[in-house]
Amino acid sequence: MPEKPRIGVYVCHCGLNIAGVVDVKKVAQDAKSLPGVVMSKDYRYLCSVPGQDLIKKDIKEHKLNRVVVAACTPNMHEATFRKVLEESGVNPYLLEIANIREHCSWVHRNEPQKATRKSTELTTMAVARARSLEPLVVKEVDALKSVLVIGGGITGINAAIDLAEMGFQVYLVERNESVGGRMSQLDKTFPTLDCSTCVLGPKMVEVYRHPNIKILSYSEVVGLEGYVGNFKVQVLKKPRYVIEENCTGCGECSTVCPIEVPNYWNMNMGVRKCISLPFEHAVPLIYRIDMDNCIKCYKCVEACGARQAILFDQEPETVELNVGAIVVAIGFDPYDPTKDEQYGYGVYPNVITGLEMERLLSAAGPTGGVINRPSDLKEPKRVAFVQCVGSRNLKRNPYCSRVCCMYSIKHARQLKEKHPEMEVAVYYMDIRAFGKGYEEFYEQAGREYKVQFIRGRVSEITEDTKTHNLIVHAEDTFLGRPMELEYDMVVLAIGLEPHSTTDKIQEILKIARSPDKFLQEAHPKLRPVDTLAAGIYIAGACQGPKDIPDSVAQAKAAASSVATLLHKGKIRIESIIASVIEDACTGCGKCLKACPFQAISLDQTRNVATIVEAKCNGCGSCAATCPVGAMQLRHYKDDQILAMIENAVP
Amino acid sequence: MAGLRYAFFLGCTIPYRVTSYEVSARKVAAKLGIELVEMQGFNCCGLPIDPISHDAMLVLAARNICLAEQQNLNITTLCTGCAITLRKVNRMLKENEELRETVNKHLKEVGMQFKGTIEVMHFAHVLAEDYGIEKIKQHVKKPLAQLQVSEHAGCHFLRPIEYAGFDDPEDPTVLKELIEATGAKYLDYMDKTNCCGFTVIAIDDKISLQLTGSKLSNMQDVGAQAVVTVCPSCFLMFDVQQPRIERAFGRTFSMPVVHYTQLLGLAMGMSAHELELDTHRVAATNLLGKIG
Amino acid sequence: MGAEAAAEVETKETIRSSRLDRNFPKEVMKHHGGEKLLLCYLCGSCAGGCPVGRLTTDYNPRQIVRMASLGLKDEVLKSNSLWFCTACFTCTDRCPQGLEVASIIRVIRNLAAERGIVPQVFKELGSNILETGLAYKIPELRLKKREEQKLPPLPLSDTKAVDKLLEATGFPKMIKEHPKKEA
């Protein structure tokens, strides 16, 4: 039997955010006379501890059974106040929030009187709804203590290890043949100039050896079903044409293979055999055949011999994984400067990108660490770095890619270390040396290594067609004069873009993108590794351009968040879900078609719709579609909404 | 393509000093079957006074567009300055309602209204796109195979990309294709998309002479036998000013300057005389020797 | 010392608040083509590619934009270098912030012209247009020669209409009068 509503109304000042426009005392006063309201107050900061305590005290003293808070958007503090109710022994769903900040004081700053009246109206509507709210059951479901990590770069690796150490079963899916990601393509890392492989290598081995981690390499996520705590993921294992269990990584097949193909790991500047590893220290150490170019000469089969690891007709395999949570760490792609024709990339042979320079500097790279320029393989005596290519450009990517200043300074310093007489210049707009040790690194590059810094964004690069030398056209803005200096090689500091698989991952996981097209975090300040999809987390460069320390920090943050979610083995699910009035249901099935989460099924014997509660996201599409009103969304039932509408017009 | 008709916008510079361009263009157009209809009562496109009053330029340009709208014909012109001005104003007035209303208020005083019904294209653009390179090739009777030339497209042919837009300003190809269609060899050269400086010749002629001179040097360095232009003002810089440039640079160029329509005309079998090649300041005798 | 000499000394000194007109950038931004003036972040892409800039230190498009956005009204309106731009639009194409740099310079030229600063050549071109509808006065001989060249007679301009339109925009007085010195 429904109890008589005893509503407490609280109008928040929110400092001056609301009180600066709305007469909060009047709103509180006006609410006193509404039916069902037992008391009505205003307070400075309701979300604060004393504010929450005030509500708790009132609930106890005045036996309130419903609370209306007129304050900021429910997105901010609905959860906060629900907890207040819960801790006071009131069902948390007997709370109604009137948004008189984002929907009122913030948008009607210049009309305080009208804003006050609107706040009163919104509060009246909220009170009307509060009268008809019903308590909802708080349910828990079992959660699997296993995690899927998508992406085996430095971010994915760190997240996987931390989770595995905490006892979770981790599946690490990596689309390339080896884990390691972009960091494996780096020679040295700023600002310490640590050798990248020396830092990354042990981690790669650790992730491979850990008993709680299963690596699915050369595999991609292709489908997702289920809900938080109980995801079913389909993973496609692409064929290597080599049997994983049989391959010992000896490399004899590669030695005899007659075909060479471009090696993407060396930015296509070097080659690899048709059957080969992408790089020597690949993890897992399993060879792969590039079947598009394989001539089936069988030399590799012969060399493999008794191991019998090669299988030309290997089929792709789909596996299904059951996990409780997902961490997306798919990383970034470098910006392609071909479309910036004024720089001549792809036309002038001696214009290369930062990532290509990284491979040239690398001892494991296509030139063994020797700096040769593409046109004549001679050592360049004058090298220019061009910053902000593809970044900070309203016609390309408006954002700053964060790491390019540092990686160019690193390259410049490395060149000067190897060749002190080389002329090295960095053309920049601003130098962003924000991290620990970064400013000192930048300063040292200029002071000690005599790297020249020229402030001016490069307008265009032209080429002397005979020598293939390049002329960099830029204004030295500090001098105020345009310059056209000649260089033997130019390196474009290209920015970072979301990885090409982001579209697909977004579609499969149903997560959001930010305006800059990177994956979107749930809150830019307070929830940097969560998404708005329950159980799905993002970390690393897929969330936005960042360096290795920040990527690792996010990896650890994501692991911690997952642990917080899953460690009890049970998850509380959303109580605001659909429910069927079975007597009214005609079994027409329209709601099934409307549901985007496949959470409804038709009970054939009784001819009524039934809801899979854990899958229901409470979107309300079914309730809106039902032609007879048999489907209701709990907490948003027709009478509850109608009560608001009826009270909207005074 | 039979049936191509355009309102022919002459502009001010051509009838004043560069009638060879007009003569060759009319002859070529006639042979190709492109009809050029006179625009009675036309006025200056407005570009020369844009630096003084943008509004004045807008009304002058708009009036010309209205004349063509009344004739129900797209405009074509031989001058890149006129082309970019009329094209830009045409698009601005089509897209910006507020601007259109302001300009139409003035136009009403002279009994006109901008309706936004026509397009503006430079004649080279018409040849390349509306007419078609393949069709042009069919009219080439005497391919200029012995000739190697470079082009000066000019700033207003290529930029700004938002309004010109039919060629890539960083790596243009339209004029290259048009030149190759005549059978001549096309030579690329350094800084080919640079400005000739005509618009500031009365402010500081040293700058203009230097700009054009650099281009002539670069063209000469690659062995170009002639410069092909598509604008009468650029033509004046390269041809009429060439002796002055030679003196300033201390270098002999003797580089004949040819309007594209003259180049095409020669390839179509017309004589140098009927194309008025002999009226240019820099003698084209060497050039003509090569075509025989 | 006299007012002019004092002004001359001031331009060579440190910029003080008194020399800045905070409303000037807003004035520029109100005109078509000048809307994005304050988006400039001084990268120098325009100056780096400017064909005139590479020939003379007297001209730098970035500096002109900077003077305007700071509010150095007098200095920029009276500067000689303002008239060196050839309107080649390379700067506009290259600007990563989408500024129509060449148009901003044109706006500042327009504002200078409103204050009576009009180089001689524009006065001549302008009066030709007012008189004949075309920017050049074409000699009779030329017009007659068209017959010989088998060219159709030059369609004469409707000068009445042209004058009426130009009058409406205030153009004639810009090139004819010598307005009083701007305060």
Image (cartoon, coloured by chain):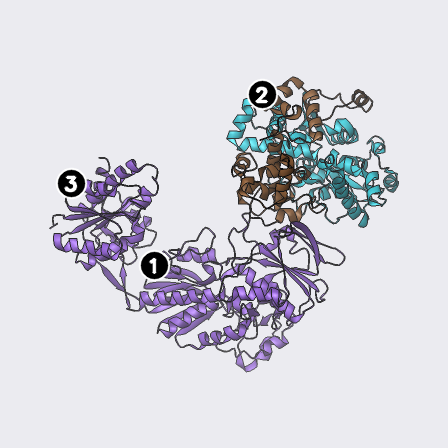
Chain colours: A purple, B cyan, C brown
Q: Report how far apart the C-alphas of labels 2 and 1 lie in the structure.
A: 63 Å
Q: Are marks 1 and 3 on the same chain?
A: yes
Q: Quadrant of residue C162?
A: top right
Which chain is home to disc 2? B
Q: Secondary structure at mark 2?
A: loop
The spot of residue A474 in percent (x, y) is 65, 52
Count residues near mark 2 (Cα–Cα under 10 Å), then give few for <14, some for 14-19, many for 20+.
Answer: some
Which chain is home to disc 1? A
Residue A316 in sight in this render: no
Q: Quadrant of residue C114?
A: top right
Q: Looking at the picture, tell me which residue is in the foreground, A227 or A81.
A: A81
Q: Report how far apart the C-alphas of labels 2 and 3 lie in the structure.
A: 67 Å
Q: Looking at the picture, tell me which residue is in the foreground, B39 or A259.
A: B39
Give the numbered dot on residue B112. Answer: 2
Q: Which residue is mark 3?
A: A33
Q: Residue furthest front?
A: C1
Q: Which residue is mark 1?
A: A534
Residue at 58% over, 37% down: C73
